[in-house]
Amino acid sequence: MAHTLRVGVVGCGNISTTYFKYAPLFKGIEITACADINSEAAKKAAETYRVQAMEPAKLIKHKDVDIILNLTVPDQHFAVSLSAVKAGKHVYSEKPLTLSLKDGLKLRDTAESNGVKVCCAPDTFLGGSHQHARKAIEDGVVGKITSGTAHVMGFGMEHWHPNPDFFFKPGGGPILDMGPYYIANLINLIGPVKRVAALTNMARPIRTISSEPRNGESITVETPTNIHALLEFHSGATVTLSASWDVWAHRHANMELYGTEGAMFVPDPNFFGGEVLTTKRAAAAEPLPAWDHPFGKPNQENRGGMVANYRSAGLADLAAAVGSNRDARCSLERTLHAVDVMTAALKSGEDDKFVEMKTTCTKPAYLSPDEARAMMR
Ligand SMILES: NC(=O)c1ccc[n+]([C@@H]2O[C@H](COP(=O)([O-])OP(=O)(O)OC[C@H]3O[C@@H](n4cnc5c(N)ncnc54)[C@H](O)[C@@H]3O)[C@@H](O)[C@H]2O)c1
């Protein structure tokens, strides 16, 4: 039987509950400890999930921890991940990997010299629907993908998150916060990006929190909140990506890909499931034939409906990759490329010109239903 890797959570905030809840679905990983600069948060999580609470610096160096699960806020990702790899730990970080390409390259070099792997969210592209879309593209169902559109637009995180400041600071904004889901899935479906151009702006320099407990407080916005990007892929495909928190309502689909033989309508890359529709040339869109992928099965209530949530799948894939010394699907190489794409969009918005990518990557390995089933307890 494969060795189980012990996971230490650093950052016991909002998203940590999702990992505590779903990690036990997977073989090869076990959350054993947690830490937070807010010791009360760590203590509460430790009591709720029956793990050991520690100081962050102690947990990162602890001999009984193999993987650091970095769930801190974006501007802490680099420092926490870097100290973990320096301590000889593997890392799985929440997105984005880092806020700059320079930091990501330093993290890569340090991880390489310490012989450890670094992975980064999102893992939603491992969802049943997105793997189904991947298979259909590789089977030639819509021909060669030549273009597409992607939209992630809404009215902002200050209306639901209890502590939304970080979304509006450098390293936040809709492209670095929500872009990772879309770019990871585009890399999964089309491959790496060659160059990027974007127009960026912001609707409001001050945002007013309407969520509890800080209802009525103000946040000064320090990053663009509206980005319209053009992505040219190495495959030749061109895709527009609109990421905005300045939109009250819209009717755009999450992701549409246009091929030489038809079109594909891809569900929300922020979730693991949803219906994938395709057309044969201009005929009416039809769902792909049913398939039984475990990471597409609805298992969580969301806004009155049910969605598929298998967050921790990427963490389990990292543990399996460590065990067999293979490439992890949420690898640093791919998430570093996503950082390159996202920061290039912001740079293009500032400089008013196309930005060539400095990095590239391969598509992650396809995850079949049988392989996904084998990952689960
Ligand atoms: N909330 C979500 O639904 C969601 C979904 C997907 C991804 N994420 C990502 O997860 C990350 C965390 O988001 P969140 O919503 O949980 O934020 P949060 O503010 O609720 O929690 C972050 C926690 O990290 C702690 N922390 C900050 N710096 C630290 C450090 N240096 N060492 C130890 N602890 C530290 C904070 O005290 C806090 O408890 C972000 O990168 C976010 O983009 C969040």
Image (cartoon, rainbow, N blue to C red):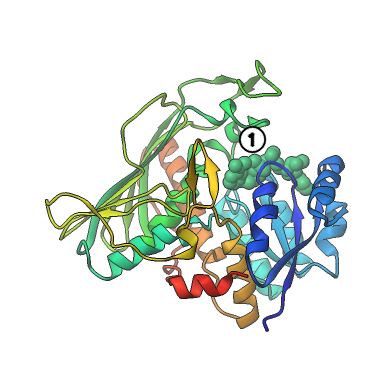
Residue 28 figure quarter? bottom right
Q: Position of residue 353 (x, y in %)?
A: 35, 42
Name the residue carrying label 1.
166
Residue 34 figure quarter? bottom right
Answer with left or right where residue 324 lies relative to residue 144.
right
Quarter of the figure that contains the N terminus: bottom right
Answer with left or right where residue 231 lies relative to residue 307.
left
Answer few, some or many: residues within 10 Å of disc 1's Cα (few below 14, many 20 plus, some between 14 and 19). some
Label 1 beta carbon within 8 A of ligand 1: yes
158 versus 299 height, above or below: above
Numbered label tally: 1
Q: Position of residue 147 (x, y in %)?
A: 24, 52
| Outermost residue to the left | 282
Callout 1, which amino acid? Phe
Q: Quadrant of ligand 1?
A: top right
The foreground one among 111 and 309 is 309
Query: Residue at position x 64%, y 49% from top?
Result: 18
For label 1, the SS is helix
Answer with left or right where residue 237 lies relative to residue 320.
left
- Answer whether residue 323 is visible to the viewer in this image: yes
Q: Position of residue 25 (x, y in %)?
A: 63, 63
Q: Position of residue 231 (x, y in %)?
A: 34, 50
The foreground one among 197 and 95 is 95
- Answer whether residue 74 is visible to the viewer in this image: no
Answer with left or right where residue 220 lies relative to residue 342.
right
55 versus 242 height, above or below: below
247 versus 281 height, above or below: above
Query: Residue at position x 85%, y 70% from top?
Result: 63
The foreground one among 37 and 53 is 53
Residue 22 figure quarter? bottom right
Query: Residue at position x 40%, y 63% from top?
Result: 131
